[in-house]
Amino acid sequence: MEEQDEQIVICEQQGSGVSVIRLNRPKVRNALNGKLRQKMADIFMQLNDDPQTKAIVLTGGDKVFAAGADINDFLTATTVDVYLRNSERYWDAITNCRKPIIAAVNGYALGGGCELAMHADIIVAGKSAKFGQPEIKIGLMPGAGGTQRLFRAIGKHKAMKLILTGDMISADAADQMGLVSEVVDDEATIQRAIEIAEQLANYSPIALAQIKEVANLGVDMPLQAGLALERKAFQILFDTDDQKEGAKAFLEKRTAEYKGQ
């Protein structure tokens, strides 16, 4: 039976200010076909403009995150076919999301699944998680950031070993390399990601957006340019109501009530 578009990616509100996006193609280990990526991109764009969403959790569920692209799609695809898909626009919807994204990874996060996880700002991995870029094993190479984001996350020599061999690494190995933020028991992965998202949802959304923007842009800048960008963003925040509320709440020893203004 053909999958229904609305079912292959599920989005639900979880607590105050938190939205959970769950990939839902369990029979093929959440393989990232075009329909799934399009639906996921649409949801990210919607949540990016949703004032009620302050943080986003991205998961594939309890058993698997995403085992990569749908290999069946590669059997007959030509260069022109792949080029005309303009699949970068699907990834851009995640890259350009201003809201913090926490990936909750259980099981396989391979190929496009590993690249998808690396689009997140924070990665919570279950002990069963396996990361890798196995494209070389089918005569291909990473095509959605695997040669770029992986280098920036763990350095050239660790990244090259993973990309050239196609080997998988465990959650603990990924943690030691700096690829993930923390490792927890599988049954706690999604809930831990939600807890982090709820914590972030209580902060100023303007400050969160500025931190994310400056950090992502600054990594590719010369140090002095990155420091200047950081300094200007820091200065801009002093003109927000949230900054004044945060300082006042701290001095009054109460919880701040941020409004994103």
Image: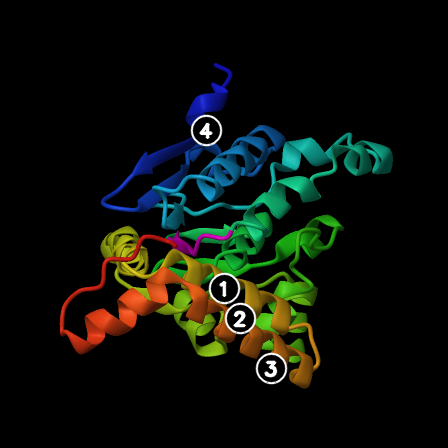
Disc number placed over residue 43 in the picture, else none? none
- Gap between marks 1 and 3, in whole Å? 14 Å
Residue 242 % position (x, y): 34, 62
Mark before the other along the chain sequence, 4 or 2: 4
Instruction: Give the farthest residue toward the top.
Output: 1
Q: Which residue, given by chain and number where applicable, does mark 2 sit on?
A: 233
The residue positioned 45% from the left and 73% from the top of the image is 173
Foreground: disc 4 or disc 3: 3
- Gap between marks 4 and 2, in whole Å? 38 Å
SS class of the residue under badge 2?
helix
The residue positioned 45% from the left and 52% from the top of the image is 99
The quadrant where residue 47 appears: top left
Q: Which residue, given by chain and number where applicable, does mark 1 sit on?
A: 210
Residue 75 % position (x, y): 74, 33
- Gap between marks 2 and 1, in whole Å? 7 Å
Left or right: 90 with respect to 183?
right
Q: Is disc 2 surrounded by few (<14), some (14 to 19) or many (20+) residues within 10 Å? A: some
Q: Nearer the viewer, residue 35 or 248?
A: 248
Q: Is disc 1 surrounded by few (<14), some (14 to 19) or many (20+) residues within 10 Å? A: some
Give the residue type that dot 3 points to: Leu
Foreground: disc 3 or disc 2: 2
Disc number placed over residue 8 in the picture, else none? 4
Q: Which residue, given by chain and number where applicable, does mark 3 sit on?
A: 227
Disc 1 + disc 3, Cβ < 8 Å: no
Q: Is disc 4 surrounded by few (<14), some (14 to 19) or many (20+) residues within 10 Å? A: some
- Gap between marks 3 and 2, in whole Å? 10 Å
Disc 4 + disc 1, Cβ < 8 Å: no
Instruction: Give the farthest residue toward the bottom.
Output: 224
Whether residue 27 is visible to the viewer of this picture, yes or no, is yes
SS class of the residue under badge 4?
helix
